Each structure stands twice: as C-alpha cells, then as structure tokens.
C-alpha cells in the first residue's frame, strides 16, 4: 500500500489541510491501518464493508476511524473547524434515519416512485411469510441464512449445504403474534446475486481444512488476514470452535448429519456457483470431486420452499458454536470501546 506517498503528495504538493481515506476493508483492517506509520498525516479513515455502527470515532495511533452502519438507516455527520491549516474543532454523530424526525422529501419520494413503477408489481409479489424476524446481524449464525440453507437442504438433501455468505440485508420483523410477508424484492435483498446451484463430493479432511480457512478469514489475529466478512453459513454440519486459537487449531468438533466427521469419508456438498471460480470450487471449498452445475438457481429453490412451507420461523439453532463468544456476537473487533448498538 503506497498510502504514505499519496498523503505526502496531498499535504505537500496539493496543499491539503485535511486528508480523508475512503476505505472498504472492514473495521478490523481499518483500525489496523490507523495504527500503521503509513497513515501518518491522515485525519480520518471513513470506512465501510463491515458497516459497523460507530457512534464515536475510534482513535488509532495516527488517525481516527468511522463506519456509518448499513441499509441507509444511518448517516455519519462529521463537522470540522479548520484554522490556519489545522483542525481546531471536530464533532461526529451517527444519525439514525428516523422517519418521525426526518420526514420524507416529497420530490425525492415522487422520483423514487416513478423509477420503481415499471417493476412494482413484479417485485411486490408475495412468495411467503415468516413468523420470526429474518435478520443477518450476527457474526456466527443467523436466522436469515438458516432459512436459505433450510431451503437448499430440502430441495437436494446432500450431506451438507453452504450459502453464499452475504452479510447484510435489512431485517424483516413480523408484528407481535403475526406474520411478515416475504416478497420478490426482499428475496433479492437477501440474495442480491442469482446464483446457479452446484453440487460435488469432498472428504472429511477437506471440510475441516475449509472450516479452518473460513474461521481464519473471519477471526484472524492479524487484521490483514481477515477476508470475506462473517463466518460461513451452512446446514447439515455442527461445528464447535474457539475463536481465540491460532489458524489450524480453532475447530474443536464437527458432525455431519449428526454423526462425527470422518477424515477419509466422502460427503456430498451443495453450494452456489460463484462467477470466476474454477469448476471444482464450491463456495470457496476447493478441489471438489464430481462437480455438477444444476439448471436451477438459489432464488428458485427458496421461492419453491416458501411456497410449500410458509409461514416459516427460522431461528439461531446452534449449528455453529464458539466456545469463547456468544451466539449473538455482533462484531469481529476486540480491544476497543466499540459496541454494536
């Protein structure tokens, strides 16, 4: 990263008094960057990717870090007073986009309605109902992804299934004692890419190696090793792990369909086809034997499942259990004053 060179150009050649870095690396990596000498001369890292709700900027050694939440539910507001080339005053607030406090702009509301009109009937089609909240905030396991993997397992009945691992989608909360409608529009919010289904065969040892890799992607002690967001979502597996252990030592227990995993046994797996992956890769599981692309998408499977099983009621079931973190873990970041709220 050649950040120091660009900061020097901005400060010394362009005469900038304030330097921001716009980042999409995630909070852990952004905090790590804020503590590196190459960030000297940066005032703020305005971050994204993990979409944490930073209500008070986090102070690194060389600069501060913010993230303004997700789903257009928040706006980060930063006011600076600059005098004689230096920041004299600074105020930051994470504003909740509260419709009672901030009424809709009628002109913009009309523009949005006109843009949506050609698609309104199609995307407004109701494909199912849920009795429990569909949400995706949790790092380890979520009701929303349990619904998706429930559908995949119902359709194909492989030993285990894996979801694409999208991390964000606005929650869908039913009224107390009632049901919330799931529409085509909400399906696209849950799964913004319509991926084809792919199946294959892997060994028990491949499963363990893949799980260790996915755990390191989410929880590596070195922030620069973190990749891809939250822990992978699945059905058919039970995995117990310790976040604080080193790479290759986190997985404590794995069962497949309720039976202890056997290293040299072959297991069938289902996942999605990700654009650009080799044919023998299924949702980051590499060297999969007998890969087969099916002529059906994840969207189609979820739609079929909801048609036959609504109202659904997915919850956090304990498919993934950390020995050193709660099931409702809301952030990967440790060692700061930050708390998700």
Image (cartoon, grey):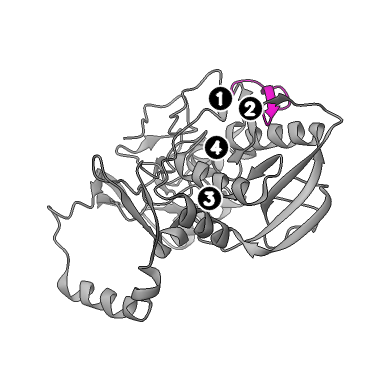
Residue sitting at x 34%, y 49%: 172
| Distance (Cα) linking label 3 and label 1 | 20 Å
* Residue designated by label 2: 239
Which residue occupies the foreground of this view, 215 or 316? 316
Magenta span includes 205:
no
| Distance (Cα) linking label 1 and label 2 | 6 Å
| Distance (Cα) linking label 2 and label 3 | 20 Å
Query: Residue 45 vs residue 236: left or right?
Result: left
Residue 7 location (% of width, % of height):
50, 53
Query: Label 4's element?
Result: loop
Query: Label 1's element?
Result: strand
Residue 185 visible in image: yes
Mark toward the start of the polypeptide (3 vs 1): 3
User: Magenta residues, as a range?
Assistant: 243-257
Residue sitting at x 58%, y 58%: 298
| Quarter of the figure with the C terminus | top left
Mark toward the start of the polypeptide (3 vs 4): 4
* Residue designated by label 3: 166
* Residue designated by label 4: 36
Q: Nearer the viewer, mark 3 or mark 4?
A: 3
Mark toward the start of the polypeptide (1 vs 4): 4
**Tag 3–tag 1 contact (CB < 8 Å):** no
222 versus 176 height, above or below: above
2 versus 138 height, above or below: below
Query: Label 3's element?
Result: loop
Judged by its main secondary structure, the magenta piece is loop
Mark toward the start of the polypeptide (2 vs 3): 3
* Residue designated by label 1: 321
223 versus 44 height, above or below: above
Which residue occupies the foreground of this view, 16 or 258? 258
Q: Dot 1: few (<14), some (14–19), or many (≥20) neighbours within 10 Å?
A: many
**Tag 1–tag 2 contact (CB < 8 Å):** yes
């Amino acid at each position: 990263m050649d950040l120091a060179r660009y900061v020097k150009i901005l400060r010394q050649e362009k005469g900038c008094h304030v330097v921001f870095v716009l980042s999409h690396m995630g909070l852990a990596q952004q905090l790590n960057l804020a503590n590196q000498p190459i960030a000297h001369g940066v005032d703020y890292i305005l971050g994204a990717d993990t979409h944490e709700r930073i209500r008070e900027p986090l102070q690194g050694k060389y600069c501060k870090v913010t993230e303004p939440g997700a789903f257009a539910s928040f706006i980060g507001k930063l006011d600076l007073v600059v005098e004689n080339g230096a920041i004299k005053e600074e105020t930051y607030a994470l504003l909740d986009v509260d419709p009672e406090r901030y009424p809709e702009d009628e002109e913009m509301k009309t523009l949005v309605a006109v843009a949506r009109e050609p698609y309104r009937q199609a995307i407004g089609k109701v494909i199912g109902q849920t009795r429990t909240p569909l949400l995706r905030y949790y790092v380890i396991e979520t009701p929303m992804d349990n619904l998706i993997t429930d559908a995949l397992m119902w359709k194909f009945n492989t030993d285990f299934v894996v979801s694409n691992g999208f991390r964000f989608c606005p929650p869908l909360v039913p009224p107390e004692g009632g049901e919330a409608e799931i529409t085509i529009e909400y399906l696209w919010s849950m799964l913004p890419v319509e991926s084809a289904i792919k199946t294959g065969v892997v060994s028990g040892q491949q499963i363990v190696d893949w799980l260790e890799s996915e755990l390191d992607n989410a929880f590596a002690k070195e922030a620069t090793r973190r990749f891809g967001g939250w822990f992978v979502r699945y059905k058919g597996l039970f995995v117990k792990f310790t976040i604080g252990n080193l790479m290759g030592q986190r997985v404590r227990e794995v069962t497949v369909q309720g039976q202890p995993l056997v290293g040299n046994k072959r297991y069938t797996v289902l996942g999605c086809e990700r654009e650009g992956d080799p044919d023998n890769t299924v949702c980051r599981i590499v060297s999969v034997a007998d890969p087969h692309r099916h002529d059906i998408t994840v969207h189609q499977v979820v739609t079929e499942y909801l048609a036959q099983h609504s109202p659904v009621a997915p919850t956090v079931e304990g498919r993934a259990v950390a020995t050193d973190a709660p099931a409702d873990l809301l952030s990967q970041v440790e060692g700061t004053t930050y708390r998700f709220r």
